[in-house]
Amino acid sequence: MPDRPLSVAVLGATGAVGQELLSLLEERSFPLKELRLLGSNRSAGKVHLWNGCDLKVQEVSKEAFRDVDLVLASAGGSVSRYWRKDICDAGAVMIDNSSAFRMDLNVPLVVPEVNSSDALRHQGVIANPNCTTILLCLILAPLAQRVPIKRVIVSTYQSASGAGA
C-alpha cells in the first residue's frame, strides 16, 4: 500500500459490519484521502454522518472502484466474488470479510497480529477469518510458539446478528 492517505471504499457500508468498519476508521483516525460508502440500490442515496461529514451511499458499480486504493468488503460472499475482478482491474486491494476467499490458496488468509507478512503476497485480495477464528488465533499463536499444538477442538455458537443489520 502507498505511504500516503488512501482512497477507501466500504462495500456493504450500511450493514452491521460496514457500520462498525466506519466507526473504526473514524476512531483510529485512519489516514484517508477519500471515503466512499458503497451499497445496494436499496441503500443508495442514504446519508450517513461520518467524522462530522454527511456521506451519501453510492450504488456499487464498476466505476465506483475507480481511483480507490483499498476496498473493505463486507457485503457477503456472492457480492465479493461478483465484484472481485472489477476491484482488482481498478487497481484496488480488497480486504474481504466474507467467506468467499478463505479457502482460496491464491488469497492470503490474514490475522494481522499473527501473520501480517502473508498480506504482502496478495494478488489484489486479502481474506480474513471469521470473528471467532480471529480471536482463537490471537490466543493460540503465542501458545503454539512455545509448545506445538497438535489439535484444537472448538465449538462456536453464532448469533443471528451475524446476518447483517
Image (spheres, rainbow, N blue to C red):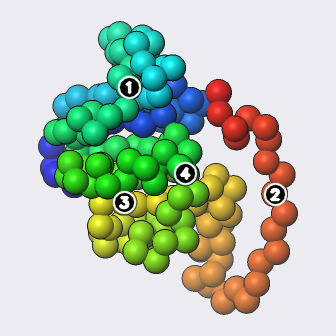
Q: Is residue 121 visible?
A: yes
Along the polypeptide, which appears first: circle 3 or circle 4?
4
Give SS at disc 1. Answer: strand
List the residue tagged with mark 2.
156
Disc nearer the start of the sequence (2/4): 4
Q: Mark 2 or mark 4: which is in front?
A: 4
- SS class of the residue under badge 4? helix
Q: Earlier in the sequence, mark 2 or mark 3?
A: 3
| Distance between the alpha carbons at the discs numbered 4 and 1 | 18 Å
Q: Is residue 151 left or right of residue 111?
A: right
Q: Is residue 117 above or below residue 128?
A: below
Left/right of residue 105 with respect to residue 144 in the rendered view: left
The residue singled out by tag 1 in the image is: 59
In contact (CB < 8 Å): disc 1 and disc 3 = no
Q: Mark 1 and mark 2: span between their CA atoms? A: 34 Å
Quarter of the image for residue 15 reads top right
Rendered residue at 70%/86% (across/down): 149
Q: Where the N terminus falls, by quadrant?
A: bottom left
Q: Which residue is mark 3?
A: 125
Return the residue nearer the eye: 68 or 156: 68
Task: For marks 3 and 4, give the one nearer the viewer.
Answer: 4
Q: Residue at x 16, y 39 (%)?
A: 67
Distance, label 2 to label 4, CA atoms, is 20 Å
Residue 87's place in the image compared with 12, above or below, is below
**What's the residue type where badge 1 is placed?**
Glu
